[in-house]
Structure formats: structure tokens, C-alpha cells
Image (cartoon, rainbow, N blue to C red):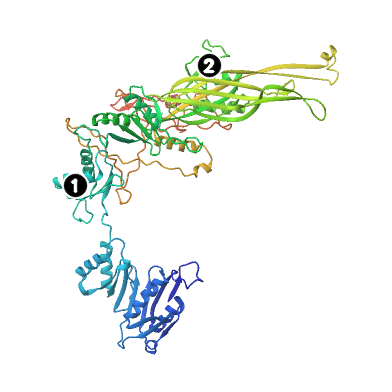
């Protein structure tokens, strides 16, 4: 025998809701009563002499923890099966013998697990709670199958019943219960239909008639068990939930729903001359402005809906804005179009669908570095505007451009330039100033500022003579403005068709040096500024340069004191004056981010450049939506639909497993058909001073593999004797063959 309290507060055993697990086997009846009420339930009890003299064995096991209140109820039922009476007299449990007839040994178990070892008991009691089916229906099925071999007693309050019979019959009954106690919709697939032109009730009625006319059993009543398609209209949400026994049948229902949900064929406007469009991706106000200009030929401007002003306060933000016949509901981000016919509604809806698309983004990397004049020759950058072969030593080709202006060169290997600059930085010939990276939405401006706000005195004004304790004093009023210094990047990408980008770039590198000017201290700000517009393709790089700065340095040495004597000091001292030229290079590389999947790949690539802490971060995954089946081709004379119902898989019922999104194919050049495949974005590595530059002429693969591709076999030749073979073209193999021939 074992009794285990499952509550952590074991001291509070008098609580009725405390749960315990009990296991009592072959215990005499009086001992069972003592353990139950004296040790477990902690309640006062009294037994008659006839009960104390009985030696009937009792077995009571619970497969899961039970509350003390529930244990008291089950134990009372068990004792009554032994012919005992249970009475509660002012908190005292009295147990009496109702008859003198003996009873056989029994066992009571709660749950659906029947013990394997029943110990030769003649009768087993099993208390079973149902999860899905009503207990009255289950009892009816069991009585029809098992007959009188198992006794059933219903417990309607808890949707359960008590089974009584032999262990083998109880096991058979439990097997049937597990088979029958299943949800009615198990194994079915579901979809949510959102009609655009008719009410959910009308859509359900028309689909019901249409499917039954085709010989498909459809119904709108949940209790209709023989229906293979169940349609449940929800007027409150404006939707119809469809359940089907197979995916093919559900797709067939969705296609007919699209055919049934058509605009009014009479040509009159719907919903009292109004229809709504929920904006998914674009800016609702910008979309309404565009649509309003189209509908009114650009003559109607934006008119804000007036809001009441109370108590001298200011007007609140408008809840809606009107653009001609188009109104924006800011709360739901919905467009309301009024006064249009069905044909015009369809045209407007087609236009809205074309405009309401996810906006692309641009991932822009900007490398800012300072290089010395001799380092420019080692970089081998060609300022002529041609593609630069970075990494090959040689003189700079000016291409007719002067050195003090803004120069431009296209770079065919950004990673090679990064490695070369990192190598030069170890020699003191270059310095990577900053490597900002920013993600900007198409047509929007993104900026990065890393630096300080430097106070600058803009004006000084005298306030005149004022009296004071020490006499007259002169008051001075200064106006100060703060000037941003450091690395400042502003970029505005515009993504065109074919993944070409127009960039408006403003790059500034500035620093402040204290300068004394009269009575005030005003800093001198050195500034190197680039502002330009570029047109690049996706993934290409451009190098901007020509911002040259000269630093003059002078030094002196010699005998202290003597070297400062005029004329004679030159014999005992040495003076030197040097100048260094540094040029600021700016390399810009843009990437087009077409959708959420490429944004996720971009985030993974950027995260891989950081430490271990970034690898442990959990990122949200993008799950592809289930595609909506296309409706069958409609006859030409029919009016095109206003809005297709949204096909949303229901989360309440099990659905077939969704396949994981396939990997995106590699990008290739456009073929004759004009189709361009996409590829995952590749992010250049963050520059590091420890990066080892690649050797000139190193032809290792781009993925870092050290293996060299095998040379292609030469043309087939026929040797003497009719033996066929391939001509040897590998120079290394030819050298080995020549050496062997000379040795012979």
C-alpha cells in the first residue's frame, strides 16, 4: 500500500482540493477504512462491530492524482458495493453494515488503464471520463455491443460512467471507448471563406444547393453525420467555415465558392454604393491619394475629416481622411470607395491589387577607408570609370580626371578590396574608418550617425553696460548651435524593374579641432563630404574617391639652447618638414531584398559574422502561406468577380502537414524569355585587421574551397594497335612523362 500527496504543500492535508495518488492492494476492509479516512482524508469516522469483523480484501488504485473530494466520492461508492452504508453525521463518517451477506473481492480503478494483475478478483470497477462524445451515446453503443456482460452506470454531471464486470470484459470495453471517443471532425480538412459580394448565409445556402445538385452530400447542420461537406456561416465575422473529408473535395468547394461570390449582375453598386478594401502592404493614405487622383483626374486634393475640439484643446489625429471618393479608415487601415458601379468596382479592385504589393527593400553596405598615396598604387584602382581589377599592383590610371575632384570606379570584387585594405592597415598604409550597413525601404531615406554633437558659437552680442557690486560689467549674449560630426550616412534607394537601383547617397566624415578665436573658443571642423546619385545593379559595387587631405608635419632637433641662436643655430641643429597625402575611399554595394524569405537569409548572413552570442539568438521564421486554388475559367459573358474569398486554413481542426519551403534556386542571367531567377543574398564579411589578403593570381573558388578543378580531357585519339584514349593536356602530367622518357 502506498499513498503519495501530489501537492507541494503536504502539510495542508485537510484541503478538499489537494490531490493524492493512492494504491491499496488486498487490504482487509477495516484496514482500508482506517487508511482512507484516518490517514488520507483526515476525517473522523466510526465503524460498526459488524464492519470491523469483516476480512474482505479491498484493492483501490488510481492511475492519476485525485482530489480529496473526488476520492471521498469514489471510496463511498466502493464501500457501498460491499454492502456498507455511508452516513455523514455532523462531520463524522459512520460506516454501517446494511446486510449480512458477504461480497466478492472487487477493485476500483479510475482512468482507461486496466491493471494487468487483478489477483483473481471476480469483479473490477472502472471509472471512465470521456473527452469528446456524450456519455449517453457511449453507453448506448457499449450496451448494443457488449450486452449484459458489463454493467454501466452513467455520471452525467462529469460526462463519465462506471463500468463493472470482469477484467477481460472491462479491457474490451476500454478498447471500444478509445475507438469511439474521437472528435466528430477528426481527419477532415477545413478552410475559411470570406465572401466579398454576398452575405455568409447566402454563400452557405448557394454552396449547399450547388454541391447537393452535383451529388455531393453537403449540409449546414452539425448533427448531419452523413454529410461529406459541412458549411457553417458566421454572420458576426463575415465568414463561412467549410469542412470536407478530403483535400480534393475542399478545393472543389473553394472553387465553387469563388464562382458563387460574384458582383451583382444588374450593374448596380453594392452595399449601398460602397465597397471596402483592406490594405495589406502599402500605405493606405498614399494608396488613397493615388486612387483619388485617378478617379477625379487629379483635381481633388486631400481633405481631412473634421474632428470636434473641446475646451480650448487641440484637435485629435483624424480617424479618417477623404481623397475624393476614397476614404481611409486609419483604425483598420481600410479604403472605402463610394458611388461606383459593379464594372467600375472591378476595375478599381484590379488597380488596388496591382498597387497593394509588398515593398522591396535594399541592403546597402558602405565601406569608408583612408589610404596613403603609395597605398593607392598597391590597390590598383582605375579611376577611368571602367571595371576596376582590384588586387593587381600598378600605377593609377587617371583617365583624364584630376586628383582633387570626385572620382568613380566600378569594382568587380568587393571582398578582394576588403582583404587588400585590411592587409594595408597592418602596414600603416590604410585605415578603415567605418563600415556602416543599413536596410532601407524602397523610396525611403535611411541614415546612420556615429559621432558627437559639437557646440559652435554662431553669434556674439553685447547686452550693454550693467551695474554690479564691483562696478559696471559688460554683458555678452552668445548663440550656440550643435553641429553633428563623425561618420554620417544618408541613403535613399529606388528599386526599378530588373533589380536595378537608383541611389541618392550623402556621406560625410568630419571631426572637430579646438581653435582659439579672440575671446571665444570655436572649433574648426574638418569635413570630407560626398553627395551623389548612382545607378547600380543588384550586388554590384562602386568605389568613390578623390577626397584628398594633406597633413603637413615639421620637426626640429639639435643641441638644446644652441640650436635656437639666430644664424649660428643652423650649425648645431636640424629642421625637417614633411607632408602626407591621404585619400578617402568610399565603396558602396547595394543588394535588393525582394521578400521576407530573402530578408531572413540576410539576417542569417549578418548574424554569422558576429560572435557566439549572436548564434544563440532565436529568430522568427517566415512560413509560406498556403496557395489558394485557382477557380475554373469562367465564360466570357460573365461579370468578373469583385474579390475572391480568402482561403485561410482553420487552426481549430487538424490539417495535412505543410511542406517546408524549398530552397531558392541560384540566380542566373536572364534568358531569351526574360525570366530572371533569384538567389540568396551574399553579404561581404566584416573587415578585420587580422584578415590575410589573397595572393595575386590566386584562383581559389569563391566559396573558399582549396581544391583545384580538374582540367578538361583532351580530344580522343587512336593509338597503335587500335587502342583508343584521350590526349594529355595537363602540363604537370606532360612534364612527368617527359622526365620518364629522358630517363629511359
The single residue placed furthest to the top in the displayed view is: 400
Q: Residues within 10 Å of mark 2 (few under 14, many from 20)?
A: some
Q: Give the quadrant of the N terminus.
A: bottom left
Q: Which residue is mark 1?
A: 208
For the residue pair 530 and 604, the one nearer the viewer reads as 530
Is the Cβ of the residue at disc 1 closer than 8 Å to that at disc 2?
no
- Above/below status of 456 relative to 705: above
Within the image, what quadrant is residue 274 found in? top left
Q: Residue at x 57, y 21 (%)?
A: 529
Q: Residue at x 24, y 65 (%)?
A: 137
Q: Is residue 199 visible?
A: yes
Q: Secondary structure at mark 1?
A: helix
- Above/below status of 656 relative to 570: below
For the residue pair 331 and 351, the one nearer the viewer reads as 331
For the residue pair 271 and 679, the one nearer the viewer reads as 271
Which of the two discs, 1 and 2, labels the residue nearer the N terminus? 1
- Image location (x, y in percent) of residue 216: 16, 48
Tell whether 45 sits left or right of 376.
left
Within the image, what quadrant is residue 199 found in? top left
Mark in the foreground, 1 or 2: 1
- Image location (x, y in percent) of residue 364: 48, 28
Q: Which residue is mark 2?
A: 407
Tell whether 15 sits left or right of 663.
right
- Above/below status of 228 relative to 333: below
Q: Give the quadrant of the C terminus.
A: top left
- Image location (x, y in percent) of residue 312: 51, 36
The single residue placed furthest to the front in the displayed view is: 311
Tell whether 409 sits left or right of 264.
right
- Image location (x, y in percent) of residue 396: 55, 15
- Above/below status of 93 relative to 533: below
Amino acid at each position: 500500500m502506498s499513498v503519495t500527496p501530489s501537492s507541494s504543500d503536504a502539510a495542508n492535508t485537510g484541503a478538499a482540493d489537494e490531490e493524492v495518488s493512492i494504491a491499496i492492494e488486498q487490504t482487509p476492509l477495516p484496514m482500508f477504512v482506517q487508511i482512507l479516512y484516518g490517514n488520507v482524508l483526515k476525517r473522523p469516522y466510526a465503524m460498526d462491530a459488524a464492519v470491523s469483523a469483516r476480512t474482505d480484501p479491498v484493492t483501490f488504485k488510481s492511475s492519476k492524482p485525485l482530489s480529496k473530494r473526488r476520492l471521498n466520492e469514489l471510496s463511498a461508492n466502493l464501500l457501498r458495493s460491499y454492502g456498507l452504508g455511508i452516513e455523514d453525521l455532523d462531520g463524522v463518517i459512520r460506516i454501517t453494515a446494511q446486510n449480512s451477506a458477504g461480497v466478492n473481492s472487487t477493485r476500483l480503478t479510475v482512468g482507461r488503464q486496466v491493471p494487468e494483475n487483478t489477483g483473481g478478483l471476480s469483479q473490477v470497477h472502472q471509472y471512465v471520463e470521456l473527452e469528446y462524445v456524450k456519455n449517453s451515446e457511449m453507453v448506448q453503443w457499449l450496451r448494443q455491443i457488449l450486452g449484459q456482460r458489463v454493467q454501466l452506470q452513467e455520471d452525467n454531471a462529469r460526462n463519465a460512467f462506471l463500468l463493472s464486470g470482469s477484467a477481460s470484459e472491462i479491457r474490451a470495453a476500454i478498447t471500444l471507448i478509445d475507438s469511439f471517443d474521437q472528435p466528430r471532425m477528426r481527419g477532415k480538412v477545413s478552410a475559411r471563406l470570406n465572401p466579398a459580394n454576398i452575405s455568409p448565409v447566402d454563400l452557405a445556402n448557394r454552396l449547399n444547393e450547388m454541391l447537393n445538385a452535383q451529388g455531393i452530400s453537403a449540409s449546414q447542420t452539425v448533427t448531419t453525420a452523413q454529410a461529406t461537406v459541412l458549411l457553417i456561416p458566421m454572420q458576426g465575422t463575415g465568414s463561412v467555415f467549410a469542412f470536407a473529408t478530403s483535400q480534393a473535395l475542399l478545393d472543389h468547394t473553394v472553387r465553387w465558392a469563388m464562382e458563387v461570390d460574384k458582383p451583382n449582375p444588374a450593374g448596380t453598386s453594392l452595399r449601398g454604393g460602397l465597397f471596402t478594401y483592406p490594405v495589406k502592404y502599402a500605405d493606405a493614405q498614399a494608396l488613397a491619394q493615388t486612387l483619388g487622383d485617378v478617379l477625379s483626374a487629379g483635381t481633388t486634393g486631400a481633405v481631412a475629416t473634421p474632428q470636434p475640439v473641446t475646451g480650448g484643446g487641440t484637435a485629435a489625429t483624424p480617424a479618417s481622411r477623404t481623397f475624393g471618393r476614397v476614404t481611409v479608415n486609419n483604425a483598420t487601415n481600410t479604403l472605402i470607395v463610394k458611388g461606383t458601379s459593379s464594372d467600375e468596382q472591378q476595375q478599381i479592385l484590379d488597380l488596388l491589387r496591382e498597387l497593394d504589393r509588398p515593398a522591396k527593400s535594399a541592403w546597402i553596405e558602405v565601406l569608408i577607408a583612408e589610404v596613403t598615396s603609395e597605398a593607392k598604387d598597391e590597390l590598383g584602382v582605375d579611376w577611368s570609370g571602367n571595371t576596376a581589377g582590384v588586387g593587381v599592383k600598378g600605377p593609377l590610371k587617371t583617365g583624364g580626371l584630376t586628383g582633387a575632384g570626385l572620382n568613380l570606379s566600378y569594382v568587380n570584387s568587393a571582398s578582394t578590396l576588403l582583404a587588400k585594405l585590411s592587409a594595408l592597415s597592418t602596414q600603416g598604409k590604410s585605415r578603415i574608418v567605418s563600415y556602416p550597413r543599413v536596410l532601407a525601404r524602397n523610396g525611403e531615406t535611411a541614415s546612420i550617425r556615429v559621432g558627437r554633437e559639437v557646440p559652435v558659437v554662431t553669434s556674439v552680442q553685447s547686452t550693454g553696460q550693467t551695474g554690479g557690486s564691483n562696478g559696471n560689467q559688460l554683458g555678452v549674449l552668445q548663440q550656440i548651435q550643435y553641429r553633428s560630426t563623425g561618420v554620417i550616412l544618408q541613403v535613399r534607394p529606388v528599386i526599378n524593374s530588373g533589380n536595378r537601383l537608383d541611389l541618392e547617397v550623402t556621406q560625410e566624415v568630419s571631426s572637430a579641432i579646438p581653435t582659439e578665436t579672440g575671446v571665444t573658443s570655436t572649433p574648426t571642423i574638418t569635413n570630407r563630404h560626398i553627395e551623389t546619385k548612382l545607378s547600380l545593379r543588384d550586388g554590384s559595387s562602386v568605389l568613390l574617391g578623390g577626397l584628398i587631405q594633406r597633413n603637413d608635419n615639421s620637426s626640429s632637433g639639435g643641441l638644446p639652447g644652441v640650436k635656437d641662436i639666430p644664424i649660428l643655430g643652423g650649425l648645431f641643429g636640424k629642421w625637417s618638414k614633411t607632408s602626407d597625402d591621404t585619400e578617402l575611399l568610399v565603396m558602396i554595394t547595394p543588394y535588393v531584398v525582394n521578400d521576407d524569405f530573402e530578408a531572413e537569409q540576410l539576417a542569417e548572413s549578418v548574424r554569422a559574422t558576429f560572435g557566439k552570442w549572436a548564434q544563440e539568438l532565436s529568430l522568427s521564421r517566415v512560413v509560406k502561406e498556403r496557395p489558394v486554388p485557382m477557380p475554373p475559367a469562367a465564360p466570357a459573358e460573365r461579370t468578373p468577380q469583385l474579390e475572391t474569398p480568402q482561403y485561410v486554413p482553420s487552426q481549430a481542426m487538424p490539417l495535412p502537414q505543410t511542406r517546408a519551403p524549398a530552397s531558392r534556386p541560384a540566380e542566373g542571367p536572364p534568358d531569351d524569355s526574360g525570366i530572371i531567377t533569384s538567389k540568396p543574398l551574399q553579404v561581404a564579411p566584416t573587415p578585420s585587421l587580422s584578415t590575410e589578403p589573397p595572393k595575386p593570381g590566386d584562383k581559389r573558388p569563391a566559396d573558399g574551397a582549396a581544391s583545384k578543378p580538374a582540367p578538361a580531357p583532351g580530344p580522343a585519339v587512336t593509338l597503335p594497335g587500335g587502342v583508343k584514349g584521350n590526349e594529355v593536356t595537363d602540363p604537370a602530367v606532360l612534364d612527368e612523362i617527359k622526365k620518364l622518357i629522358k630517363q629511359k
